[in-house]
Image: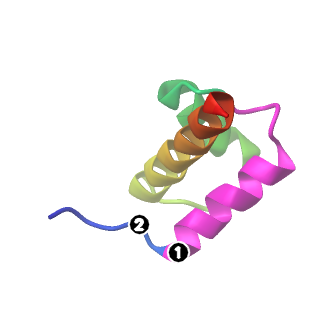
């Protein structure tokens, strides 16, 4: 069993993705940098990585459809 993402982080990730869909890609490393660059939310390193990972997941699911 691993840690589960909290709904707060998922909501923040969804908000960022909806606000800047063209900014994010399907590459996790690029999304980590872009989440930090937005500066909209003050994240710890762990939270920022979770948000970037969730955005990457959203982007890849969108491309599959």
Q: Between marks 1 and 2, how big is the CA–CA gap?
A: 6 Å
Q: Nearer the viewer, residue 43 or 12?
A: 12
Q: Which mark is residue 5?
A: 2
Residue 23 counted in the magenta span: yes
Using the image, determine if residue 8 lies above or below residue 43.
below
Name the residue located 55 percent from the left edge and 38 percent from the top edge.
Answer: 56
Q: Quadrant of the C terminus?
A: top right
Instruction: Tell me the colour scheme of the image.
Output: rainbow
Name the residue located 56 percent from the left edge and 64 percent from the top edge.
Answer: 10
Determine if residue 40 is in view: no
Name the residue located 70 percent from the left edge and 33 percent from the top edge.
Answer: 24
Q: Which segment is the magenta one?
A: 7-24
From the top left corner, tell me how far across and down residue 5 is, in percent: 41, 66
Please rate how many residues cluster around mark 1, counting C-alpha atoms within 10 Å: few if below 14, some from 14 to 19, many from 20. few
Name the residue located 61 percent from the left edge and 30 percent from the top edge.
Answer: 64
Q: Is residue 10 left or right of residue 15?
A: left
Using the image, determine if residue 16 lies above or below residue 30.
below
Residue 38 counted in the magenta span: no
Q: Which mark is residue 7?
A: 1
Q: Secondary structure at mark 2?
A: loop
From the top left corner, tell me how far across and down residue 30 is, in percent: 57, 26
From the top left corner, tell me how far across and down residue 46 is, in percent: 39, 54
């Amino acid at each position: 069993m691993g840690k589960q993402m909290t709904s707060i982080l998922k909501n923040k990730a969804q908000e960022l993705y909806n606000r800047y869909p063209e900014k994010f890609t399907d590459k996790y490393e690029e999304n980590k940098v872009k989440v930090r660059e937005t500066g909209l939310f003050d994240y710890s390193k762990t939270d920022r990585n979770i948000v970037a990972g969730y955005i990457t997941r959203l982007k890849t699911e969108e491309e599959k459809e």
